[in-house]
Image (cartoon, grey):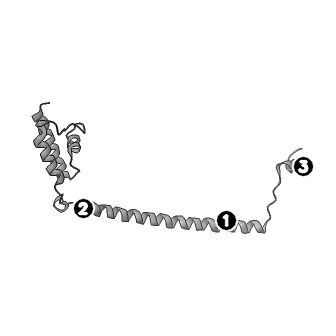
């Protein structure tokens, strides 16, 4: 593809990245244009003006209010708060379940104390009488 057409393709990709608010660097512009990450090289003379435009766009602060979006840190803070609440709910649920397991084990122990459990070793089982089964 001729260099002029390629540069125009990269300029359109740069414009899309600027309006979308994504990270702007040589690799991101190249990928947005459908080329490989390292296809825009500073050593190529035909790309000098394009590289200046990309460099200028990469240092411009993004005004999120103009773009109609909230600041990323606010979104992240909301997500952290939401996930923290979910974690707290999960931990509370786990504690309740552990308490229930403890209570059931205690109840089970109490029942076993009331009725002693007789454990018959396998070697002694053959000497026990069989009820209802022919010998």
Count of numbered marks? 3
Give the image location of residue 118, x and y in percent. Answer: 82, 59
Please report contact status of discs 2 and 3: CB closer than 8 Å, yes or no. Answer: no
Q: Which residue is mark 2?
A: 71
Q: Is residue 111 left or right of residue 31?
A: right
Q: Which residue is mark 3?
A: 127
Q: Nearer the viewer, residue 25 or 9?
A: 25
* SS type, badge 3: loop
- Which picture quadrant has residue 46? top left
- Which picture quadrant has residue 2? top left
Give me the C-alpha separation between circle 1 and circle 3. Answer: 33 Å
* SS type, badge 2: loop
Q: Which residue is mark 1?
A: 105
Residue ID at (37%, 65%)? 81
Give the image location of residue 89, x and y in percent. Answer: 46, 66
Task: Of the two numbered discs 2 and 1 on the same chain, state the one appearing first in sequence.
Answer: 2
Please report contact status of discs 1 and 3: CB closer than 8 Å, yes or no. Answer: no
Q: Nearer the viewer, residue 46 or 71?
A: 46
Residue ID at (15%, 36%)? 44
């Amino acid at each position: 593809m001729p260099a002029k057409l390629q540069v125009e393709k990269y300029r359109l990709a740069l414009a899309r990245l600027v309006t979308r608010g994504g990270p702007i660097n040589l690799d991101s512009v190249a990928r947005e244009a459908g080329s490989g990450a390292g296809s825009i090289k500073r050593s190529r003379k035909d790309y000098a003006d394009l590289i200046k435009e990309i460099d200028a766009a990469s240092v411009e602060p993004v005004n999120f209010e103009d773009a109609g979006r909230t600041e990323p840190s606010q979104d992240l803070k909301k997500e952290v708060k939401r996930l923290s609440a979910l974690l707290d709910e999960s931990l509370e649920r786990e504690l309740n379940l552990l308490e229930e397991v403890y209570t059931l084990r205690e109840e089970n122990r109490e029942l076993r104390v009331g009725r002693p459990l007789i454990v018959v070793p396998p070697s002694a089982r053959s000497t026990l009488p069989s009820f209802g089964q022919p010998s």
